[in-house]
Image: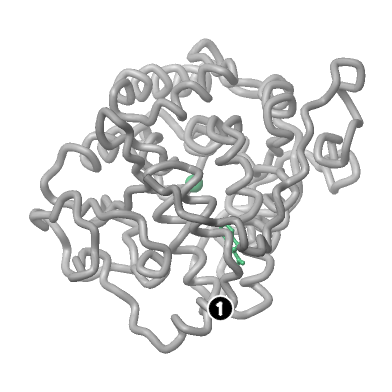
Amino acid sequence: MESIAVAAMAAPCQKPRFRAPSPAGALGVGSALGRNIDAMNTSPPKRVEHQQTDKGYVPVYTTDVVEQPWASYSATDHEVWATLFKRQREILRGRASDAFLVAQDAMGMSPDAIPKFDDLNAALGAATGWEIIGVEGLLPELTFFDHLANRRFPVTWWIRKPEQLDYLAEPDLFHDLFGHVPLLMNPVFADYMQCYGRGGVKAHGIGPEALVNLTRLYWYTVEFGLIRQSDGLRIYGSGIVSSKGESIHCLESDAPNRIGFDLERIMRTRYRIDTYQKTYFVIDSFEQLMQATAPDFTPIYARLASQDSIPAGDVLATDAVFHRGSGEGWLNDGDV
Ligand code: PHE
Ligand code: CO
């Protein structure tokens, strides 16, 4: 229940102005729909791997938007997609949120072949005005935020190898397409993602600490969020729905905490990047998420600057606890 009065609140992220296209004007309606990609830098795919940077030896990618090289996917690539798609759909029945499953069906994704971005874009454009664009991999933060703020979701064009079915350290096409893209069909979630992008551009201007706070929100909602349905807890986070092990762990294991959504608490909470999460945060609805994140975060960032971060596995006296984790198997260090 979140029938809280929200009326007087000035919304820094105005209701995004998407209007469904009239059948006659399928292309080039509003700017939200036009294929901005034409105006952007396009080039053939090139993956630039493992360059030495000030952060060590990490993957670095071009920020270019690339045409999905669909014809160059091998039979093995399509098989990897099919295997993962079927396996996750099976696991996600009764575990993923209805909203996710409905959206994925509505997009027309199937195990038969790696979907063509153009086909998905036809469905997305009509539903919410979002568009997916091909990229080489992780983007610099500001580039990523700018895409989201303009309703473009960057999708890594390449897919993992058969020996990486269960885990790889960076997003690939399966994670991005199977995990992230379906909920962009959902009008409320679609708005949340755009607002997040705008908030990211702003946080980037405020400073690195604000960005850390905002990134935790993304992590604990978009990537690892749970939602409470009338019939129980369900998954909506992309990092979970694209992982066989974590899809089961997050709901059925005694180890992790499951705690009610609390914006500032989340923005203070560290997280795991190389193990399952120690804590999952539970929303009641995407509307709740929208309302809770609507206020200007500027004063929140200022307030959080003087507060300590919270270790990933801690439970606070003020938490709304659905499940207190047993902590079994937790590593003591490694929170980021
Ligand atoms: N309200 C946030 C701000 O002012 C923007 C935001 C919206 C961030 C939704 C995340 C999600 O910064
Ligand atoms: Co992701």
Q: Residue at x 49, y 71 (%)?
A: 212
Identify the residue under disc 1: 208
On the question of residue 71 being in view, the answer is: no
Res 106 quadrant in image? top right
Identify the image quadrant of the C terminus.
Answer: bottom left
**Residue most toward the top?**
112
Q: Colour scheme in the image?
A: one colour
Q: Is residue 249 left or right of residue 52?
A: left
Q: Residue at x 55, y 15 (%)?
A: 113
Q: Is residue 255 left or right of residue 275?
A: left
Q: Position of residue 54 (x, y in %)?
A: 55, 77
Q: Quick one: 309 or 56, which is closer to the camera?
A: 309
Neighbor class of circle 1 (other Cα within 10 Å; few <14, some 14-19, many 20+) is: few
Q: Quick one: 254 or 160, which is closer to the camera?
A: 254
Q: Residue type at mark 1?
A: Pro
Q: Position of residue 169 (x, y in %)?
A: 41, 50
- On whether ligand 1 comes within 8 Å of the CB at mark 1, the answer is no
Identify the image quadrant of the N terminus.
Answer: top left
**Number of disc labels:** 1
Q: Quick one: 216 or 291, which is closer to the camera?
A: 291
Q: Residue at x 27, y 40 (%)?
A: 246
Compared to residue 8, the image places residue 82 above or below, namely: above
Compared to residue 166, the image places residue 111 above or below, namely: above
On the question of residue 105 being in view, the answer is: yes
Q: Position of residue 195 (x, y in %)?
A: 64, 54
Q: Position of residue 233 (x, y in %)?
A: 27, 37
**Secondary structure category for the residue under label 1:** helix
Compared to residue 43, the image places residue 318 above or below, namely: below
Q: Residue at x 42, y 63 (%)?
A: 263
